[in-house]
Image (cartoon, rainbow, N blue to C red):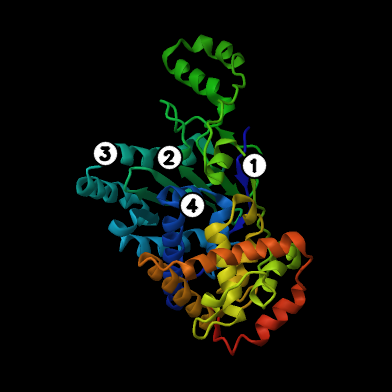
Amino acid sequence: MKRTGHADLPLHTGTVPKWLADRMMQMGTLIVESIVQNYGKREVLLRLSDPLWFQSFGAVMGMDWHSSGITTSVMYALKRGLNARAKELGLCVCGGRGKYSRQTPDELRFLGDATGMDADALIRASKLTAKVDNTAVQDGYQLYMHNFILADDGSWAVVQQGMNPAAKTARRYHWCSLALPQTADSFVNAPHTGIIGENRGTILNLTATEADRTRSSILSLVKEDPAKVIKEAELIASCSTPPVPQTGSLFEAQYLQGVQKSLSMPAHHEVRKEDVDLKRLGAVLATSHGQNPDNFENLLLTPGLGPRTLQSLTLVSEVINGTPSRFTDPARFSFAHGGKDGHPFPVPLTIYDESIRVLHDSIEKSKLGYNDKSECIRRLHQSALAIEQHCEPEADFDAVLKYEKAHSKEWNGRTC
């Protein structure tokens, strides 16, 4: 069976406190707005369809770095933030968890009536993605969350999640219309951009490319005499993968080429040294503590901006500007704003608010044609890359944690 990606997502209970939920809404919306400004709406959909990027995105916003709750909290934050500015940004989030997932068709019908888009086609896409992951892929997980992210050009992405209460694990599924081949069987012929969840052994996946003949046989069985069942079963064979079209987006190219997505989320709650690429983290720390090779006068003159906020902004810059290979260790992004559960350290609200303010200021100024600060934030990621490639700034993991926790009270660190 073809696998496009996997990871362990332990089920966690609890809710996201308002003090974090509101900040996640602001930070998540600003990051998406920056991606739209720099790369367009298409790139937002492609990134939301990347399981590793999505996990890093949630971690940089202060959510638990490895739990199933990152899915619902991130999508709720985006729904609150993006829908209020849907006309401006051209993106809208439908659905949600539980009863809200069942409201998706009504929300899509409303959007179709308001914009002239084909609501019936969108509703069909929504229902099919849910049906495929709940029925055509029988992996022991029952869907309980479904989000349909729609752009004003009719393209879309889906992020949905299933639960296995007995195993105390969850599995997240990602879809994107931009990566679907435009054929009659698009929804049932290897449609996923990624599947995340604990490996529970052999599963029934009737959407794999290799199952094309199996699907055809099933349709034939419905019409033919039962005596042909054995004969038809013997005809099941693998089918070749269709050629990959050329694309200018690294995220889209990766999806269409079927690059493996592997993200193994451990059961332990705390962030450990082995969960983080220490060289990458070291480059971030070096960039934010005065060892960067570029000139950041315009950004550094921002009132109140210090090394710790610059550290957060460097990781935010990577979420906005990084290529797919940069998100193989999502735990690293929790070093931007910590985690609500206190791992790797309490959420530093003073730093978080400053990050939001600086990012918002850079976006607003760029709308007026003043791109200096926006360019500086982009260069933070480039500087970290340069340090990582040419130096050996591997982080002292224990020292970093000790430093963060020692300053937690000063930075108004909070947990729940």
Residue under circle 3?
118
Of label 2 and label 3, which has the lower sequence position? 3
Residue under circle 4?
48
Left/right placement of residue 367 relative to residue 193 reads left
Q: Residues within 10 Å of mark 2 (few under 14, many from 20)?
A: many
Q: CA distance from mark 1 to mark 3?
A: 33 Å
Q: Position of residue 48 (x, y in %)?
A: 48, 52
Q: Residue furthest bottom?
A: 410
Going by the numbered disc 4, the residue's amino acid type is Leu
| Depicted 73 relative to depicted 99: above or below | below
Residue 260 vs residue 283, the one in the foreground = 283
The circle drawn on residue 177 is: 2
Q: What kind of element bears circle 1?
A: loop
Q: CA distance from mark 2 to mark 3?
A: 14 Å
Of label 4 and label 1, which has the lower sequence position? 4
Q: Quadrant of the N terminus?
A: top right
Whether the residues at callouts 2 and 4 have beta carbons within 8 Å, the answer is no
| Depicted 346 relative to depicted 93: above or below | below
Q: Is residue 15 visible?
A: no
